[in-house]
Amino acid sequence: MSQNNLGDKVLVSVSTQYVDDQSDPAEERFVFTYSITIHNTSDIAVKLKSRYWLITDSNGKKVEVQGDGVIGQQPILKPDAKFHYTSGAVVETPVATMEGYYVMINKLDETEFHAPINVFRLAQPNILN
């Protein structure tokens, strides 16, 4: 299986939530959680090695975040397995976007590939019509 095909078989779904009690709009502090489910639909075990995020607020400010694993873990997903976690982001505007990828390892031959994370929106409730 080629590297590109394997990346297409690790599916990432996202849901987000605004954290009102930790946010302070007057101080340009908007806190969000995002819950991620990673589903390995391939027939090969894979390991999540690291992550890359690009966070863009509505002022155009971009922040890149990179690091090993997620929430202190580098899970191995067997074929058809899912891994779920929740993390958070703090931005300076009530609307922002996040996108990126996970660097994954094919456990069959130890090659690396990217599992894309499509762009998703962080938005304070009722800010968008």
Image (cartoon, rainbow, N blue to C red):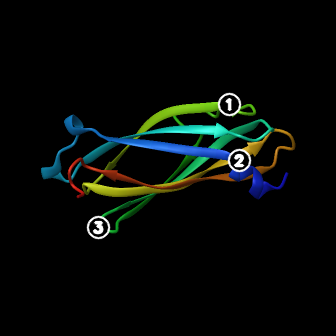
Q: Nearer the viewer, mark 3 or mark 1?
A: 1
Q: Outermost residue toward the front? A: 129
Q: Secondary structure at mark 3?
A: loop
Mark 1 residue element: loop
User: On screen, 11 above or below 59?
Assistant: above
Q: Nearer the viewer, mark 3 or mark 2?
A: 2
- In front of the other: 112 or 82: 82
Label 2: which secondary element:
loop
Of labels 3 and 1, earlier in sequence is: 3
Residue located at (33% from left, 43% from top)? 32
Q: Residues within 10 Å of mark 1 (few under 14, many from 20)?
A: some
Instruction: Find out whether the residues at labels 3 and 2 contact each other: C-beta distance under 8 Å.
Output: no
On the image, numbered disc 2 is attached to which residue? Answer: 9
| Residue positioned 68% across, 31% down in the render | 81
Q: Which residue is mark 3?
A: 59
Q: Picture coordinates of residue 24 (x, y %)?
A: 17, 45
